Amino acid sequence: MKILEIKDLTFTYPGAKMPTLRDINLTIEKGDFIAIVGNNGCGKSTLCKVMNGLIPHFISGEFEGSVFADGTDTKEVEIGDLAKIVGYVYQDFENQIVRPTVLDDASYACMNFAMPDYLERGRQALKNCGLQGKEDEYIWQLSGGQTHLLALAGAVSLEPEILILDEPIAQLDPRHADLIYGILKDLNERLGKTIIVIEHHTEYIADYCRHVMLLKEGHVEWMLPTEEALNKVEALQESNIFPPQVTLAAYHLREQGKLLRGSLLPFTISTGKEVFKELIFSQNKIQEKESNGKGISVSFQDISVSYRSVKGEPKKIYEHLNLDLYKGEKIALIGSNGAGKSTLMKLMTGLVKPNEGEIYLKDISVGDTKPERLSRYVSMVYQNPEDMFIMDSIEADIAYAMKVRDVEDWQERTSGLLERFRLTDIKDRDGRLLSGGQMRRASLAIGVALCPEILLLDEPTANLDIATRKEIMKTLKDIEDVTDTVMIATHDMQLVSEWAERIIVLDQGKVIADGSRNEVFGNKTVVEKAGIRPPEIFSMGKALHEDAFCYTVEEFLQSFV
């Protein structure tokens, strides 16, 4: 039974020269679980906004064709009524949270529709979304994953047949990501909801989705069963999508003649065990990365940070933290949402003040130093790069910090940064209107404008496709001669494995591990306690041989013959 049907759809934004969506004909069956994939800018979010009626009701443009959701023509009914058919959780889901307490927010939409059972609907939605028992808590008491589930509960309370989620796990740690997808699986299998996700993480697609739709330049290239779709390695890579690491490894082995052609490639660890069972583990000769740090760059001495919650209860973030960072290190800071990663970075910039203890940048006390002086030593690039843009052009944003501090050669340095970060051709554009990769590069240029000795990056690869991610990795290499010490807070374990020399694991404000890849990922206790999800290829290697330590596909191919 069809639940969603799109016929001859073409949509063009006002002022755009080309359609964002073109000639789309699509049918989705009731009860399906579909992932929409494609490179940044291919039209994924636009397509989903067509499905729930935001286009054309709230977002204008040239609209041709028809969209039927559960038999209802989306152009013929009010957007509020469509919300009862198609629920939507946005990528920036925090903007969907409008009430101070959990139950108030979950039942808010139903109350607006004057449903007499709005509280009961809210409670049931919270139960269905794994938030039972949180009804009376304040929004700011929730973790990032719980807040995302609350946004989902708000949509679920209206009991729509279709649920759409845009990048549901982009900003979440693996533990909360697993929780989100577990809830979606339950809603799909137990309640029969049709689930549509925009997703870059193909490992989650492999584990949960039944079909995959590839969108390319605004057109549906194909929609296939998940296993068949993830076997289209070349097509996925051409659209800047990472196939699962297990699939990539098998693909390369097949190209080398070590696997038979014609058979389907594995797409999960369980299917990989069967396909790779004949491989022989060779002595692991992979050189472990070593930190090249020399001399203390930052010293945290007996740091305690706490605040009082809205209910007056003390909330401890750090208690007697002692930690040294060294000049020249490439550090990954990992841990679950709420572990204290962002707070640690903000302590270094002076944005957060400790209740006790001292922080030193070399011999400079952070607590006794004005922020404008600190900015010459340490710079932070935020998770949302648009927060870095305050002027009307990239060039002006890069120049701003240097101009206000009367840096003599600011014009020359601005031109140099534009060239270094490949921004010269777009220097006059507003940073907030750039693509994801351009935004990231521009925010990094702003971050290093004052040549800080320490650069802090918060989730630099979140929401990015392959091409944009490669851009960021190249940019990280570009800045090695500009700044001494780089720390990245991230949930991207592939980035950690490829880039970091030192890994610091935080859990509830405590450092529970600090060392190399092998020391962190090889410690099962740490992995379980911090909710770390090692790179899939690492888990695949361990499933084949307990002595295997493979963090990339290349390392896997070196270790197994």
Image (cartoon, rainbow, N blue to C red):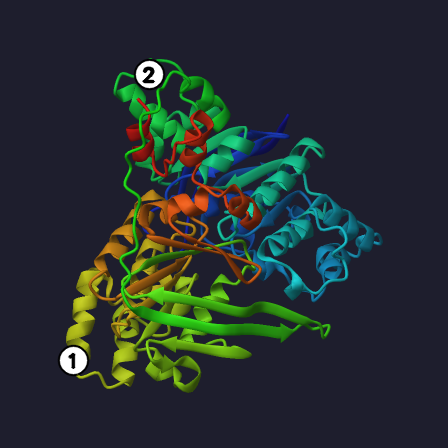
- Give the quarter of the image for residue 22: top left
Which label's residue is closer to the chain start, 2 or 1? Answer: 2
Which residue carries the number 2 mark? 259
The image's mark for residue 491 is none
Task: State which quadrant residue 425 falls in.
Answer: bottom left
Q: Amino acid at mark 2?
A: Leu
Residue 494 percent across, percent down from the top left: 38, 44
Q: Identify the amino acid type marked 1.
A: Asp
Viewer-closest of 365 and 209: 365
For the point 56% across and 44% down, the residue is 528
The structure residue drawn at horizontal position 32% and vertical position 32%, both measured from the top left corner, is 284
Q: Residues within 10 Å of mark 1 (few under 14, many from 20)?
A: few
Q: Which residue is mark 1?
A: 409
Q: Nearer the viewer, residue 358 or 191?
A: 358
Q: Is residue 191 left or right of residue 252?
A: right
- Residue 386, position as x, y percentages in the image: 40, 65
